[in-house]
Image: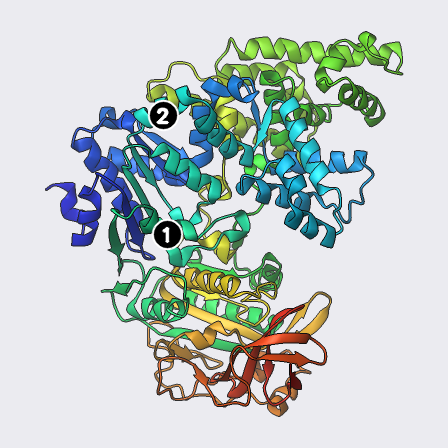
Amino acid sequence: MHFLDNLNEIQRKAVVATEGPSLIVAGAGSGKTRVLTYRIAYMLQQGIPAGQIMALTFTNKAAREMKERILKLVPAQDARYLTMGTFHSVCVHLIRPYADLLGYTSAFTIYDTADSKSLLKAICKERGLDEKIYKSSAVLGRISMAKNRCISPAQYGANQHLLKEDREARMYELATVYSIYQSRLMAANAMDFDDILINMLRLMDTCPEARDRYQQQFKYILVDEYQDTNYVQYLLVNRLAQPQQNICVVGDDAQSIYSFRGADISNILNFQRQYPQAQLFKLERNYRSTQNIVNAANSLIHNNIHQIKKNVYSEGEEGSPLGLKAFVDDRAEATGIVEMIMREKRNTTRNLSYEDIAVLYRTNAQSRAFEGELRKNNIPYRIYGGTSFYQRKEIKDTLAYFRLAVNPKDNEALLRALTFPSRGIGDTTMKKVTLCAIENNQSYLEVMRHPDDYPLEMSGPMRKKISAFAAMIDEMAVQSEEMDAFRFAEMLLKQTGLTTALMMDRTTEGIDRAQNVQELLNAIREFVTQRANEGIDYTPITDFLSEVSLMTDQDDNQADTTDRVTLMTVHAAKGLEFPVVYIVGLEENLFPSQFCTTQYEIEEERRLFYVAITRAMQTCVVSYARQRFRNGQITFNSPSRFLNDIDRAYMQILKNNPQPSTTRWGANTTWGTPFRSSSYEQHTTTRTQAAQPQPSIPTRTTTNQVMPIESIYSAGERIEHKVFGPGTVNRVYRDLVTENDKIEIAFDKVGTKTLLLSHAKLERL
């Protein structure tokens, strides 16, 4: 049997259409990875050389899984020279041979987020800037935003709109900080994550030799998760795809949720406009979820205006409707959800493990209440996306020595390396070295090599200490070029005293740190062995550093064999699936976020909810709390507007003691009574589950749970509110969950707010 026989009709068509541009719109759970994998395998089988194929993903994990699947379909030698990996890892590989044309050496290092923040913090401190205003995360976010839009430091400083935004944030010197930051990176022979893509684009635009080489080499470009690409990635893909235009992009606009990282949904929405001859394939059959879950998700996302219309369907079992549960407060919500988890676990018919269950929330702060309840009931759990292995201090300390050995200009690596083991070189000494290096446009290590050549005010013994450290690093640098990654790592740990220092600490924490470093050695050995199996005889430490630097959060989440409930944000859950999913905190100003005011932002929040629902395979429960402790005070909340978007034919209210999900939820359930202010107030003094209000979804006659109503106000009308000021009416409607008439207004100064029509004191303008 040919492997194409494992595909449905539309999947097969998408696989065999190898020539010219193609857009594959893959609905949730529709077998996207299979189609992409089979397409590459089919191309190889048709005689297309592996070296002509480039497949770009967003995680190394996804690339590895795809390659493993390909090797099950075609002989290993046919797939040997495939170029497959993340945008960043592939671009690093392509840049290194031409690094000198960009002002770097081929041994350039890559700054992770922590390195970038550290450098920015130092720059702001040098300039005497208030760290409460110039927070390193905020500054880095602004700079990253600029780079994602291809805005250089010079262009930033001339952009009046950006400067106005900085003034409003009281960050008057951000343009200067950006300029200094970029020059420091160049001086350190280092790139941050954004620089990798920017420099690849620069290479394609300024070096005809490199552009022609790569365009001729990679005649077939495939991009996974195209809805998550930013502007720079969009430009890169299109540069590489010229002139053959054998470009295949795969994605789902309904799952575009990373605009805060620079992702631009218009890339996928406008693909056919850019390539009018492109073939469109819609993968609409969902293989993951029950019919009710798919239908509920469809009814939600159909409310978005900006989308590629598709009709996702499931041929699986009908399954239970989405469960809807209201709680008095956030503590009761945590208690109630954990009780549901315990009931699911006790249900012998389903025989679920804890690892089959996930709790999804909008913000990380929501995990606290659930952690407490899970611990109280001795239920094992894990927080997805916790401190990763490669972010642990002892690992970053060790990697700093590796980085410094291959790139002596890496100032951030040097500062970290000096902290462990102790060298007797303190902050005061390094402050003198740092200032001297900046004044003389030298690396920190260069000054430490020759302290007598610079006006350093320090004692003779201290000069010997810093020069001895520099000599040790220089010796490491020589050996890094002579040894493979594993032998070099072993040697460095001994020569630098890292092993001895780690072994001296016999506390539990110290032993853990030593074991972690040993595990790092194991990882390097596995990396070298894997490369050898691929026919690569020599693997330098630079290759391993590139691999580690470009790891994503998902890549580093090691397979955890412990049976435990998963807690995570919805953003972190993308790409995952669970038999049972609880989506909590479905309240206005939480989900959607209070910071979302425009239609574009609300649509992304709706897509985020869509992603959450479609993680569920069999059971999905959504919940909200009428009051929640936030920012040091109790807030009273309305149910999320997104609950109104879901066709109630696919949603069922859960009573206090819902039946196990082997039966259809609510088979014996009657609709609850609507929320009333008076009835709700009597519950606000207690936090017990017994006092929980029940949501109401009245009998529906239409497909939407928002009913337009006649009103003295109409959409587009200008009004003024005594507190919020002037604004424009978006809509007037009846909320069928709460049975209240509401008016949604986009205020000029405070964003979009929804008010009770009966209480809104408005004046026409």
User: Residue 264: horizontal and vertical position, in percent?
Assistant: 46, 50
Instruction: Give the vertical position of 661 relative to 151 (above or below).
Output: below
Say which residue appears at 44% left-offset and 61% top-offset: 607
User: Residue 664: horizontal and vertical position, in percent?
Assistant: 33, 77
Say which residue appears at 19% left-offset and 37% top-offset: 42
Instruction: Give the vertical position of 221 relative to 542 (above or below).
Output: below
Q: Is residue 591 or residue 75 the one in the foreground?
A: 591
- Element at label 1: loop
Residue placed under numbered mark 2 in the picture? 214
Mark 1: few/some/many CA within 10 Å (<14, 14-19, 20+) = few
- Give the amino acid at mark 1: Asn
Disc count in the image?
2
User: Residue 639: horizontal and vertical position, in percent?
Assistant: 54, 76
Residue 743 showing in the rendered view: yes
Instruction: Give the vertical position of 474 relative to 207 (above or below).
Output: above
Q: Which mark is residue 584?
A: none
Q: Is residue 301 or residue 708 the one in the foreground?
A: 708
Sequence order check, earlier mark of 1 and 2: 2
- Give the amino acid at mark 2: Tyr
Q: Which mark is residue 270?
A: 1
Residue 421, quarter of the rendered image: top right
Q: Nearer the viewer, mark 1 or mark 2?
A: 1
